Amino acid sequence: MATPVKVHGPPLSTAVSRVLACLIEKDVPFQLIPVNMAKGEHKSPDFLKIQPFGQVPAFQDEAISLFESRAICRYVCEKYAEKGNKGLYGTNPLAKASIDQWVEAEGQSFNPPSSVLVFQLAFAPRMKLKQDESLISQNETKLEKVLEVYEKRLGESRFLAGDEFSLADLSHLPNAHYLVTATDRGEMFTSKKNVGRWWGEISSRDSWKKVVDMQKQST
Amino acid sequence: MAVMKVHGNPLSTATQRVLACLYEKDVEFQFVNVDMAAGEHKSENFLSHNPFGQVPAFEEGDLKLFESRAITQYIAHEYSDKGTQLLLPGSNKTMAVLHLWKEVESHQFDPPSAKLIYELRFKRFVGMTPDSAVVDEHEAKLAKVLDVYEARLAQSKYLAGDHFTLADLHHLPNVEFFKRSSVKKLFESRPHVAAWVDDITARPSWIKVLDLQKQKV
């Protein structure tokens, strides 16, 4: 039996949870190694060796050491292609191209404003940091525009890249989860017919429920 | 095989990223200019190519794609046996290292770069004054990223391995601008980064992209 892969970082981190969701979808056993960010462990010399930008997650299996959650997810999908959800990253080049397109859209258009809102609305209050109202307002406007595009797309297609749940939808789970469950801006998703329907489907997947449990257990 | 079409603007960094890839692969394509000054990228017709109303968009027969980095990935894979090999197809491991450095460009290098280009290039183009506090803030961020690049390029000739790949190519549009701006000091003070920038911006495919820009302006 292969050694479990290692993921370094707290499950509450959006980028870490992206990787965990992917590993669970692919049925790949893993070991979660804590990183004490409150104590600055992610900036320690030892950690910087496996993630030179001092961010989580970092990932290791017997072949390789990696970082950047979306690169880790692609590696897991390609290396363990025959395990778990085989279609997660597409089973042919055209499907893959569509998934890559929507993973890029998530990374370039959805992630920037939603990350700011997650930090400002879900994390800053818990960390007793002052919220920046103008940053919140600007990023709400940006995110709203992105969700309008998604509303149209998800009226034409069951999932972002096509008829099946893919890495493209999975990539959105971490930030959307916090916005819907830990802030009062959830209706940006839930009040839209198609986005609301999509959110309901992707967030009720067993893999995501397991990640949410891991997050709850870690607090 | 259907002809590939790129809808974009030669001044757009994202469009240039795709053009550089096509020239490297030495494949035929049609360039369809999108008149952004006239708002064409927000027209109904263009939105059917890219619902975010951004350039570039790509077509090959029935396949329609947007997001420059997804387009380059598709082209590099589909035309793997033509022109320059832009991937590292040896193993899952080498491909993973390529994906990693493509993500680094996307999420570490591009955000501060885009902010700097907005201040130093776009604002000047439309007659506004750059905000020096914003410039300082993002130069500091970019400097930290370039420290990681300096360490990486001291052990690896190119970012993902020993030959030029998409991971390096994706940087071309932004580093070209920085070479000619005040930001160049951040590159010049890091010898491995400086050598890498000189190397990649001298590639014939990139010179072709710059020539196209000159013709269309």
Image: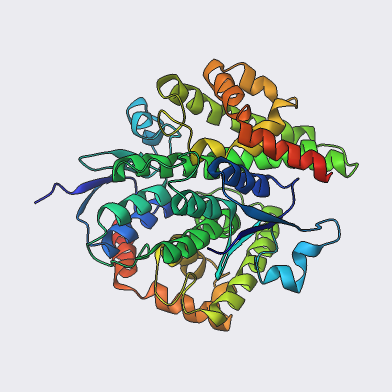
B212 versus A182 height, above or below: above
Q: Which of B59 and A57 is in front in this view?
A: B59
B83 versus A45 height, above or below: below
Q: Can residue B138 be seen in this view?
A: no
Q: Nearer the viewer, residue B118 or B55?
A: B55
Percent position of residue B49, x then y:
65, 67
Percent position of residue A193, x then y:
56, 84
Q: Nearer the viewer, residue B11 or A36?
A: B11
Q: Residue pushed farthest front?
A: B1
Q: Can residue A158 be seen in this view?
A: yes
Which residue: 74% across, 51% down?
B9
B144 versus A25 height, above or below: above
Percent position of residue B102, x then y:
48, 43
Percent position of residue B164, x then y:
48, 33
Q: Residue pushed farthest left?
A: A1
B18 versus B157 height, above or below: below
Which residue: 24% across, 65% down?
A84
Query: From the image, which quarter does the C terminus of chain A lie in?
Result: bottom left
Q: Residue pushed farthest right?
A: B127
